[in-house]
Image (tube, grey):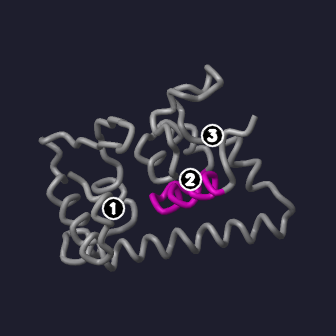
């Protein structure tokens, strides 16, 4: 039974690298992250519809699955790691250049960006047409998150039907 496409596995690994999670062992905890599942493009970001009962609540692949993807012949393995690292670097630089400009995180280290902007607690609600993320009103970085979102949307606007309500 195949639960994940190669594209989903690549996205999961790439976004984790962008967030500073370089080790595959980190994916045992990341596999339960609904926000990462949405970024990857999973239809069920909570993982409740997984066929195997042991995998329910885990919408993403674990370290073993990702390890099998990366353990291809040696030359291809190095090329894949280089490609993933390169894409992660470009995404991080794009976030820094377009999303973080004019914010206190404009010159921050990757670990600080991850801690203050990307590693957030949010309530996730899934409906037929949308996935809703609700941040706590007491979140100290909520205004910063909104400003970064607005910066990114001004740089590359979402289609009108996909804009958040």
Q: Label 2 belongs to which residue?
A: 12
Q: Nearer the viewer, mark 2 or mark 1?
A: 2
Seen at 33% across and 62% down, the residue is 113
The residue at which mark 3 appears reads as: 62
Q: Which residue is mark 1?
A: 113
Mark 2 or mark 1: name the one nearer the start of the chain: 2
Cα distance between the residues tagged 2 and 3? 10 Å
Look at the picture and state if 48 lies above or below 5.
above
Dot 3 surroundings within 10 Å: few (below 14), some, or many (20 or more)? many
Say which residue appears at 39% left-offset and 60% top-offset.
111
Gap between marks 1 and 3, in whole Å?
Answer: 24 Å
Residue 21, magenta (yes or no): yes
Does 144 sit left or right of 57 as displayed?
left
* Magenta residue span: 7-23
Residue 29 forms part of the magenta stretch: no
Decide: is 105 above or below 46. Answer: below
């Amino acid at each position: 039974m195949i639960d994940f496409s190669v594209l989903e596995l690549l996205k999961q690994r790439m976004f984790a690298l962008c967030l500073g999670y370089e080790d595959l062992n980190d994916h045992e905890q990341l596999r339960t992250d609904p926000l990462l599942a949405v970024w990857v493009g999973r239809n069920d970001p909570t993982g409740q519809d997984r066929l195997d009962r042991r995998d329910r609540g885990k919408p993403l692949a674990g370290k073993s699955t990702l390890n099998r993807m990366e353990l291809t012949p040696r030359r291809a393995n190095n090329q894949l790691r280089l490609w993933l690292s390169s894409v992660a670097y470009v995404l991080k630089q794009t976030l820094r250049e377009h999303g973080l400009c004019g914010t206190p995180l404009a010159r921050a280290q990757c670990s600080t960006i991850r801690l203050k902007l990307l590693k957030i607690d949010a309530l996730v609600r899934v409906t037929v047409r949308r996935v809703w993320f609700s941040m706590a009103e007491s979140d100290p970085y909520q205004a910063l998150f909104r400003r970064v979102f607005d910066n990114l949307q001004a740089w590359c606007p979402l289609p009108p039907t996909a804009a958040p309500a």
